[in-house]
Image: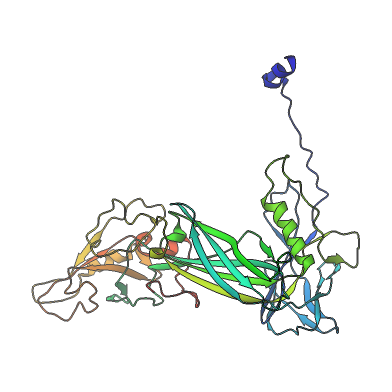
């Protein structure tokens, strides 16, 4: 009983000092496969101690090359932020390859020679609904030759989101002119891109046929920005050697499936990269070599069986009628007050008074040197010729910049080449 009392009584508590070790730090970490038929990207960084507040310590000014088993070198170029790249290269499937690295401190690293694996195509990419709030993605693949057996996947996801209001006009060179959809000045639709941060591996080694079915990938949750407009997943599939599969499988266990002291404890990661000039140095990473196959899936928000973000909520504006896209509230702006400016109507269009045009010098409304407008009270809902009919006045509604320019939420209004037009 006395033991129980001591455990719960505050006077029995003692300060705990973890004595975090700083020895397991500053090891070179190598990330990225050698790719045939596409670009190769290798990222170099340094491990840090638990007490280090640095998020990521990148390795700069290294010399990196791919070397084949006939001593032919393919040098990579440094891109910055620890990333090194080799342009599209078609490596031979009958040769073996390794990575050579010389760091700025003069140390030399090499990976083991590995065969150039040929990756079969991705058969399908699809999703299943888990609940009212989530969906998960899955893939199927197979190799009729039976030569793959070990697979790895990652993916790039890109999604579009929209500003609260779409602009049909802009104030440019002291004139109100039509704003062309998807032009350089159109910032009503923006795009974000992210990379998968999980490890996905699969094996058919214990199966009669080299087939992978229902391999689970990531997923989407309801009410997030990714589900609000158009979502694109680009799945990449790689063939692995048995050693490569074991490495990534152990890495997955160590990083994703540990929850308590009663769970499986971390497994040692035996990579295939070594410090030649200082053999006792630890190196983190595994270099594989293969072709890569890609499968893309495009999903409009109407394709998803989960709840998308609420459209407009309680916000009411004069231009709201007929506008049915989803949006996310602008940053630091709970409401978007609607301001208006009208043409003169006595004898037809005579231009806006100079004092009215001066309104648009307000920095809150400027959009990269142009002002965006919402049109209303015009002959048609999407009219782009407001100055031709005499005797008719036009009212233009305009909003603060944060309500019209989607870039203020951090995305880019430049549509990636692989991304479908948002209204596909």
Query: Does the image show residue 162?
Result: no
Counting from the top left corner in percent of width and height, residue 1 is at: 72, 14
Q: Quadrant of residue 326?
A: bottom left
Looking at this view, is 393 or 76 the one in front? Answer: 76
Specify the color scheme: rainbow
- Point 59% across, 60% down: residue: 216
Counting from the top left corner in percent of width and height, residue 130 is at: 49, 54
Location of residue 248 with respect to 257 vertically, above or below: below
Looking at this view, is 62 or 293 the one in front? Answer: 293
- Taking the image as shown, residue 136 lies to the left or right of residue 323, namely right
Looking at this view, is 293 or 104 the one in front? Answer: 293
Quadrant where the C terminus is found in the figure: bottom left
- Taking the image as shown, residue 76 lies to the left or right of residue 420, namely right
Give the total of numbered labels: 0
- Point 74% across, 14% down: residue: 2
- Taking the image as shown, residue 169 lies to the left or right of residue 10, namely left
Counting from the top left corner in percent of width and height, residue 287 is at: 77, 69
Counting from the top left corner in percent of width and height, residue 29 is at: 76, 62
Looking at this view, is 132 or 57 the one in front? Answer: 132
Location of residue 82 with respect to 9 vertically, above or below: below
Q: Residue furthest toward the top? A: 2
Q: Quadrant of residue 143?
A: bottom right
- Point 71% across, 18% down: residue: 4
């Amino acid at each position: 009983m006395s033991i129980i009392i001591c455990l719960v009584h505050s006077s029995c508590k003692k300060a705990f000092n973890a004595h975090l070790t700083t020895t397991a730090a500053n090891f070179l970490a190598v990330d990225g496969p050698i790719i045939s038929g596409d670009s190769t990207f290798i990222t170099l960084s340094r491990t840090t101690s638990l007490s280090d507040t640095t998020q990521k310590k990148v390795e700069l000014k290294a010399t990196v090359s791919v070397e084949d088993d006939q001593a032919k070198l393919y040098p990579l170029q440094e891109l910055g932020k620890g990333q090194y790249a080799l342009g599209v290269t078609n490596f031979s499937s009958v040769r073996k390859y390794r990575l050579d690295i010389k760091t700025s401190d003069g140390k030399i690293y090499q990976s083991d020679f590995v065969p150039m694996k040929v990756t079969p195509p991705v058969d399908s990419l699809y999703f299943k609904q888990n609940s009212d709030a989530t969906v998960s993605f899955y893939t199927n693949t197979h190799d009729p030759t039976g030569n793959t057996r070990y697979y790895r996947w990652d993916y790039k996801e890109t999604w579009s989101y929209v500003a609260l209001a779409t602009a049909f006009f802009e104030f440019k060179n002291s004139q109100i002119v039509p704003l062309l959809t998807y032009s350089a000045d159109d910032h009503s639709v923006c795009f974000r891109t992210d990379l998968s941060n999980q490890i996905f591996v699969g094996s058919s080694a214990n199966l009669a046929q080299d087939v992978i079915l229902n391999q689970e990938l990531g997923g989407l949750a309801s009410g997030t920005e990714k589900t609000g407009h158009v979502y694109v997943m680009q799945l990449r599939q790689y063939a692995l050697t048995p050693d490569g599969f074991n490495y990534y499988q152990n890495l997955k266990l160590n990083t994703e499936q540990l929850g308590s002291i009663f769970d499986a404890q971390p497994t040692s990661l035996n990579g295939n990269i070594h410090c030649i000039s200082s053999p006792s140095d630890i190196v983190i990473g595994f270099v594989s070599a293969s072709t890569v196959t890609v499968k893309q899936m495009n999903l409009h928000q109407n394709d998803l069986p989960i709840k998308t973000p609420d459209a407009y909520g309680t916000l009411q504006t004069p231009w709201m009628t007929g506008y049915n896209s989803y949006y996310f509230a602008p940053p630091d702006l709970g409401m978007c007050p609607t301001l208006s400016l009208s043409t003169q109507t006595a004898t037809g269009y005579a231009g806006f008074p100079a004092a009215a045009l001066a309104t648009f010098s307000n920095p809150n409304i400027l959009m990269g040197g142009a002002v965006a407008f919402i049109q209303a009270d015009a002959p048609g809902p999407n009219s782009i010729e407001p100055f031709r009919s005499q005797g008719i006045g036009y009212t233009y509604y305009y909003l603060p910049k944060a309500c019209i320019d989607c870039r203020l939420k951090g995305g880019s209004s430049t549509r990636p080449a692989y991304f479908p037009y948002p209204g596909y």
